[in-house]
Amino acid sequence: MLVADCRPKRTMPNRKLLPGLLGLIAFSLAATFVYLRYKANDPLALRNEMLARMPASANAVVFLDLAALRSSPFLAQILAWAPYPARDEDYAQFVQATGFNYERDLDRVALAVSRTSNGSRFLVIADGHFNREKISAYARRSGKSETRNGTTVFLIAPGGSSQVWYFTFLRKDRMAWTNDPSAAALAWQPDPFAAEWRERYARLAGTPLFAVIRQDSGTASALAQQTPGGFRSPQLAALLAQLQWISIAVKPDNNVLRVVAEGECPSEATMRQLNDFLSGILVLAQGGLNGAGARDKLDPQLREGYLELLQSVEIQKADRGSSKSVRVVFEVTPKLLQAARAAGPPVSTAAPGGWPLTH
């Protein structure tokens, strides 16, 4: 009697397919490795990681990509124009002890500043080349360390002051600093308002230096106090106080420095007034520099540099639906920096040509 064998037959894999299958797996692993390695070194990805740690409750966030600026020919012009700071012995000792020099070893910095009832709080995330062992040893000699949630946090008092700063290593090439004693200050916490910041960070992608300010009455008052006396304008201060967001971006473009300042608020009327006011100021400035007073009092090269800057100014309006904005764009050239350096420090805070901004 014959009985049929109904058990499923095992089929041996086609040996001709094995090399191709192994090759596909190897290619996939290599592609994944290359992608992860590229992402880890991608400046935009690094920037977004740092900005994601900025608290969404901040009043202002500043980002600086020194690694990108070092490759700009304009940076040499700025360094030649800016006065070199006097040698600081404490900093020299710090460099010798830690091997860290910010001019050479610092790549990127993100800074958030928040106002609280107890004063200002800051958080700094810094990317660079750090010798962790030397920096840790220096910090323990200058202060102390403690463990929080499995993370080593260093406490130091800068300059012998009573204020305490806290810092930790997030990884070998990233550190976090703050003056906030809360344990959560050095850790990123999701925030429902983070999307508002992310939207503005996205607009500034590719910009190596920018500041984003979330306005309130205190911020507007602080900005007004920083304006030189000859340039203060109650009308301009009132318009700026109505802005909800202010963004300032700086980007080298060949041998010029392109600066973009933008203010946002929901009111179309406020934006129209601000646009008209700034356009009027631009006309007054050009007229003042072309007047006899400016020709007699200003160095000719400096006057030409100012005129060149004013001629580059563009004032633009933008409508993003719920948000209206006015944007001011201008360019700083090496010619202006060289003229300003040759002319020396200004003797007065009055506006060029004697035209006051007291409208």
Image (cartoon, rainbow, N blue to C red):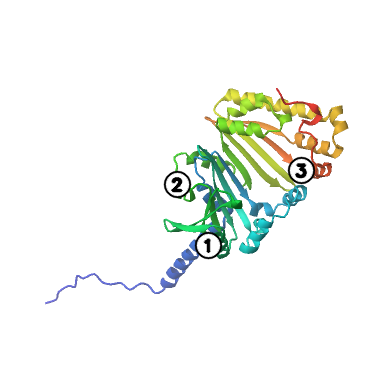
Is 67 on the left or on the right of 299, as rendered? left
Query: Is disc 2 placed on a helix, strand or loop?
Result: loop
Q: Position of residue 100 (x, y in %)?
A: 63, 60
Residue 318: tell me if it is visible.
Answer: no
* Mark positioned earlier in the residue sequence (3 or 1): 1
Q: Give the label, 3 or 2, closer to the camera.
A: 2
Q: Which mark is residue 129?
A: none
- Hey, which quadrant is residue 224 in on the image? top right
Q: Residue at x 77, y 29 (%)?
A: 285
Which residue extends farthest left? 1
Query: Is disc 3 placed on a helix, strand or loop?
Result: loop
Q: Residue at x 66, y 26 (%)?
A: 236
Q: Give the label, 3 or 1, closer to the camera.
A: 3
Residue type, label 2:
Gln
Give the camera-side residue of 248 and 354: 354
* Mark positioned earlier in the residue sequence (3 or 2): 2
Residue type, label 1:
Val
| Quadrant occupied by the C terminus | top right
Residue under pointer 2: 189
How many angstroms separate mark 3 from mark 2 (CA)? 41 Å
How many angstroms separate mark 2 from mark 1 (CA)? 30 Å
Residue under pointer 1: 34
Residue type, label 3:
Thr
| Quadrant occupied by the N terminus | bottom left
How many angstroms separate mark 3 from mark 1 (CA)? 40 Å
Residue under pointer 3: 333
Give the camera-side residue of 181 and 219: 181
Q: Position of residue 133 (x, y in %)?
A: 55, 65
